[in-house]
Amino acid sequence: MGLTDDDKAHVKAVWGEIQSHAGDIGAEAITRMFAAHPTTKTYFSHIDVSPGSADIKAHGKKVAAAIGEAVGHIDNIAGALDKLSDLHAQKLRVDPVNFGLLSHCILVAIAANHPGLLKASTLVSMDKFMARVSVVLTSKYR
């Protein structure tokens, strides 16, 4: 599932709207993921997973930075996220399913904070982009 030029434009436009507070959206997405899918907390036993904690905010910024990197290198997402893919597959051994869960929660957090930003075509583009990011992050598992 490749990204079309329209998809890339939509993704860049959405990121342009949210990048100034993307860390907050990342933290909200993680909090939503933990609430909806409590088993995902198992990978975070070393941090405070309470909503709004400093640890969640810090990890939200990391998630946002990775997404920003992918947006900035939208034509080479695999290259941009190569080290992160290695980390999650080889060291952290995160269940690949979790990337899809987080991707969905990111889209929900964007929609909740920016009503109207994710129109139908933009949502499809963002969903394709987040799916591509998830595929890249799980590519080292094979």
Image (spheres, grey):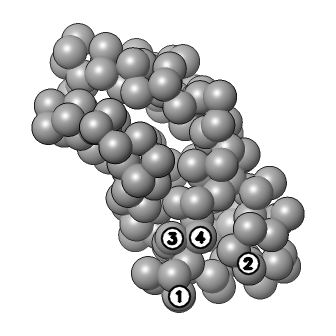
- Category of crowding for the residue at label 4, using alpha-carbon neighbours closer than 10 angstroms: few (below 14), some (14–19), many (at least 20): many
Q: Residue at x 14, y 38 (%)?
A: 120
* Mark carried by residue 39: 1
Residue 114 lies, in percent from the top left, at: 41, 41
Q: Tell us which disc is closer to us: 4 or 1.
A: 4
SS for dot 2: loop
From mark 4 to mark 1, how far is it between C-alphas? 13 Å
SS for dot 4: helix
In the rendered view, tell whether residue 69 sits above or below residue 116.
above
Q: Are marks 3 and 4 in contact (CB under 8 Å)?
A: yes
Q: Tell us which disc is closer to us: 2 or 1.
A: 2
- Category of crowding for the residue at label 2, using alpha-carbon neighbours closer than 10 angstroms: few (below 14), some (14–19), many (at least 20): some
Q: Quadrant of residue 83?
A: top right
* Nearer-N-terminus badge (4/2): 4
SS for dot 1: helix
* Nearer-N-terminus badge (2/1): 1
Residue 20 lies, in percent from the top left, at: 65, 28
Q: Residue at x 39, y 19 (%)?
A: 13
